[in-house]
């Protein structure tokens, strides 16, 4: 199996696994049980992990709160600020992950008003649109750092400045960006940022929310006094240590890895656009995640393509409706203006540092005949050929 | 997620293509919903479907149901073909995931649409021909549900 779905998840690296292992059995102490070494050791190692995460992101370790996922971090940031602020308006974008969109939809049912900012055909949110949307009643702006489907990277610093000028706190879902793009929270200026370990070779089931000192936020999970009383639940020591190790490894040689991934991605994009007619590359040409490529192949439906690719040994992803349970294709592809029928025929490839040029070459040999086969049985393509002749 | 039978018909679809001198052509579904099926038939003077081909824009299940439906009516009379239900297509495929049942409905309707075209061309009428409004998302026909497991 050739794995081209790194935006979905990544494998836990051997180094991360080794760092975690002692904390399952031997060093199993509860970090709250600080009167004996088993507990205080766990507490110390957890706090060291927090420091590592803070150093990687350029913030204070007191501003890092561990959560069980990126989705929990998104839920906490949005609900937590909405509940605390007393204001009733939230601004987000049309292309957010469902962890943000469905949280906002939930709040709408609780009487909040939500503005979903549109994006342009590259998937970018306009700072001017944001400025116009902010009102005296705006509690929070939440805009994702980089999109999980089309890879477009938002001008977060600029958008954050717009919100701050009007005194509105800013959250960013950076699940696709952390571990892949260099992030310095001091420069960026956001008030909250969500991240998830399994996107950068850490384990699933652990994430974090950065909350800038002074941010007014309500807790989401009530109970014990963990995470400075802000997030109850016995800390997942092993996973927290795994997250920190994964992030520090990802940060350590980011430039080299990014250059490798980008070179492979560019070769793959060029190869596909050259070989397959009636193909659209979705997302911004430059402002995009290094490993992301998202195509729409006109006149075919995406699921058949995914099945054929899986049978040929490739793990990839699609924004087609048939690959999900609903009849609608990806909300992201519709938001960048693709008509339904074109959005149905989309394919997302997300490369990682472990992928090789041979794998890209193998993909470039495999994909074009699959598209050709599916088009040959498509009544839409039949019409195109008829018009051409 | 799919049965072996579905995967077989998806990978090796039977009766793909067009019939140049078809005397029955039907198209159902629409691109917006993500499924279009087009059926070509050659029907002889005894109302026997002597040849049938299809073209489908759609998911794996849409391709497999088109393939199976064409197999099931090939060589049959129009009256027999009109009795084909989506349930029979699903059973022949040894099941479909619940979210894909609409594909079998579309296959049934594609057969009916082609026969309707034949009726228009020849002036012959048959009982039991259903009409399809094109979008499976808005389908209100009472097709039999047949869920896998």
Image (spheres, rainbow, N blue to C red):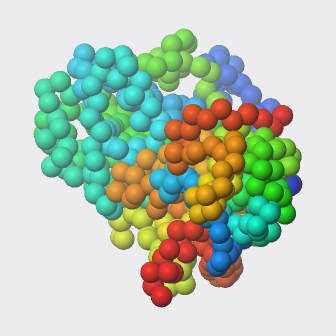
Q: What residue appears at the point 44 percent right and 71 percent down from the top-left corner?
A: A280
Q: In front here: B90 or A173?
A: B90
Whether residue A275 is situated above or below residue A63 in the rendered picture: below
Q: What residue appears at the point 56 percent right and 38 percent down from the top-left corner?
A: B139
Question: Would you say A273 lies left or right of A368 here?
Answer: left
Q: What residue appears at the point 86 percent right and 49 percent down from the top-left corner?
A: B92
Regarding residue A353, the answer to whether it shows in the image is no
Furthest residue to the bottom?
A: A389
Q: In front here: A196 or B64?
A: B64
Furthest residue to the top?
A: A223
Q: Position of residue A382 (x, y in %)?
A: 55, 75
Q: Position of residue B91 (x, y in %)?
A: 84, 44
Q: In front here: A89 or A30?
A: A89
Number of on-image labels: 0
* Residue A360 lies in quadrant: bottom right
Q: What residue appears at the point 54 percent right and 41 percent down from the top-left corner?
A: B137
Question: Would you say A303 lies left or right of B64 here?
Answer: left
Whether residue B129 is situated above or below residue A301 in the rendered picture: above
Whether residue B58 is situated above or below residue B15 in the rendered picture: above
The quarter of the picture where the C terminus of chain B appears is top right
Q: Position of residue A273 (x, y in %)?
A: 49, 80
Regarding residue A368, the answer to whether it shows in the image is yes
Question: Would you say B25 lies left or right of B7 here?
Answer: left
* Residue B145 lies in quadrant: top right
Whether residue A190 is situated above or below residue A389 in the rendered picture: above
Q: Position of residue A181 (x, y in %)?
A: 43, 59
């Amino acid at each position: 199996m050739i794995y081209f779905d790194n935006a979905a998840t990544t494998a836990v690296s051997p180094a991360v696994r080794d760092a975690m292992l002692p904390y399952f059995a031997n060093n199993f102490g509860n970090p709250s049980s600080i009167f004996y070494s088993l507990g205080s050791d766990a507490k110390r190692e957890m706090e060291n992990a927090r420091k590592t995460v803070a150093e990687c992101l350029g913030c204070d370790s007191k501003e890092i709160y561990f959560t069980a996922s990126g989705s929990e971090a998104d839920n906490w940031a949005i609900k937590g600020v909405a509940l605390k602020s007393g204001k009733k308006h939230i601004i987000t974008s049309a292309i957010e992950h469902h962890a943000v969109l469905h949280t906002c939809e939930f709040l709408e049912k609780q009487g909040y008003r939500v503005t979903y900012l549109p994006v342009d055909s590259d998937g970018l949110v306009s700072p001017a649109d944001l400025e116009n949307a902010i009102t005296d009643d705006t509690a929070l702006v939440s805009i994702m750092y980089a999109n999980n489907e089309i890879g477009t990277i938002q001008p977060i610093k600029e958008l954050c400045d717009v919100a701050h000028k009007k005194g509105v706190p800013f959250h960013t879902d950076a699940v696709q960006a952390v571990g892949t793009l260099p992030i310095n929270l001091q420069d960026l200026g956001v008030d909250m940022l969500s991240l998830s370990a399994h996107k950068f070779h850490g384990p699933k089931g652990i994430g974090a929310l950065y909350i800038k000192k002074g941010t007014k936020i309500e807790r989401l999970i009530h109970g014990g006094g963990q995470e400075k009383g802000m997030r109850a639940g016995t800390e997942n020591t092993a996973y927290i240590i795994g997250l920190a190790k994964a992030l520090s490894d990802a940060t350590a040689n980011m430039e080299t890895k990014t250059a490798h991934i980008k070179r492979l991605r560019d070769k793959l994009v060029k190869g596909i656009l050259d070989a397959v007619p009636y193909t659209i590359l979705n997302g911004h040409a430059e402002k995009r995640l290094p490993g992301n490529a998202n195509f729409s192949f006109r006149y075919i439906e995406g699921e058949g393509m995914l099945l054929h690719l899986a049978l040929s040994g490739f793990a990839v992803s699609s924004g087609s409706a048939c690959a999900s349970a609903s009849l609608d294709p990806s909300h992201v592809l519709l938001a960048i203006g693709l008509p339904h029928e074109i959005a149905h025929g989309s394919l997302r490839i997300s490369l990682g540092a472990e992928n090789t040029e041979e794998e890209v070459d193998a993909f470039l040999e495999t994909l074009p005949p699959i598209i050709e086969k599916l088009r040959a049985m498509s009544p839409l393509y039949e019409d195109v050929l008829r018009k051409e002749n | 997620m799919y049965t072996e039978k579905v995967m077989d018909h998806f990978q090796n679809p039977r009766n793909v293509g067009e019939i140049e001198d078809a005397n029955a052509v039907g198209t159902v579904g629409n691109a917006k919903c993500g499924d279009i099926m087009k059926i070509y038939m050659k029907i002889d003077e005894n109302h026997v479907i002597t040849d049938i081909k299809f073209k489908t824009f759609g998911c794996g299940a849409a391709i497999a149901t088109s393939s199976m439906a064409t197999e099931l009516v090939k060589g049959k009379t129009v009256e027999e073909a009109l009795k084909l239900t989506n349930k029979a297509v699903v059973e022949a495929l040894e099941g479909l995931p619940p979210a894909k049942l609409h594909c079998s409905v579309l296959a049934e309707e594609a057969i009916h649409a082609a026969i309707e075209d034949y009726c228009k061309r020849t002036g012959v009428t048959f009982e039991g021909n259903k009409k399809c409004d094109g979008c499976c998302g808005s389908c209100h026909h009472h097709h039999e549900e047949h869920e896998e497991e």
